Amino acid sequence: MEIALIRIDSRLIHGQVVQGWLPSLSVKEVVVVSDTAASSRLMGKMMRMSLPQEYALQVMEPSAAASYLLGEAQGKALVLVEDVSSLSRLASAGVKLKEVIIGNTKYEESKKQYSQGVFLSADEYSLLKQMYEETGVDFILKTLPTSLKTRLF
């Protein structure tokens, strides 16, 4: 499967994705990478209802998502990843990362703010920095396709 875009967004499928990102990409499928969503039938049903019917939806934990993305599936997909840990597990399972959009992460008091909606713990930042140094993947802070592109590193 061809990956059109990988986006870290703790909200997964929501208005910015449906109204902003999907129309800007030539995709027919959305792959959600989340342990939480993969283990909840209710979350899967809610995401299906939030996504226009013309898009296929896969909701998987990171290792299953990696197998799916690296397998025989045809087409082009938007990959939505819930958090930095899931992205790291996806990459460790063999998914090649070139550019990752960081759109929204969960706020916690102990996290540092890097842009509107993007908060990273010291461990998350270190993990992204390590991935950047080892693979050269670009981490971009960007809310919408029309937003300015700001590199994390």
Image (cartoon, grey):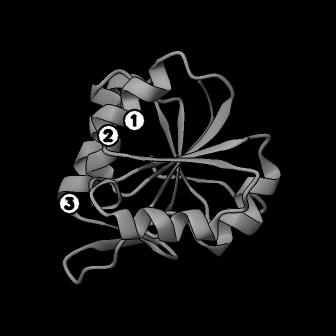
* Residue 62, label in figure: 2
Q: Distance of mark 1 from mark 2, alpha carbons?
A: 5 Å
Looking at the image, the residue that sits furthest to the bottom is 109
* Mark 3 secondary-structure assignment: helix
Horizontal and vertical percent for residue 145? 74, 57
Q: Is residue 48 left or right of residue 10?
A: right
* Residue 65, label in figure: 1
Q: Quadrant of residue 26?
A: top right
Q: Residues within 10 Å of mark 3 (few under 14, many from 20)?
A: few
Q: Residues within 10 Å of mark 1 (few under 14, many from 20)?
A: many
Horizontal and vertical percent for residue 91? 34, 30
- Residue 118 visible (yes or no): yes
Which residue is depicted at the point 47% across and 17% down? 71
Residue at label 3?
A: 122
Q: Quadrant of residue 6?
A: top right
Q: Is residue 135 left or right of residue 24?
A: left
Quarter holding the N terminus is top right
Horizontal and vertical percent for residue 130? 27, 36
Count of numbered marks? 3
Mark 1 touches mark 2? (CB < 8 Å): yes
Q: Residues within 10 Å of mark 2 (few under 14, many from 20)?
A: many
> Amino acid type of disc 1?
Ala
Mark 2 touches mark 3? (CB < 8 Å): no
Q: Distance of mark 1 from mark 3, alpha carbons?
A: 26 Å
| Disc on the earlier residue, 1 or 3 | 1
Q: Quadrant of residue 64?
A: top left
- Of tags 2 and 3, which is closer to the observer? 2
Which residue is more in the foreground, 19 or 56? Answer: 56
> Amino acid type of disc 3?
Ala
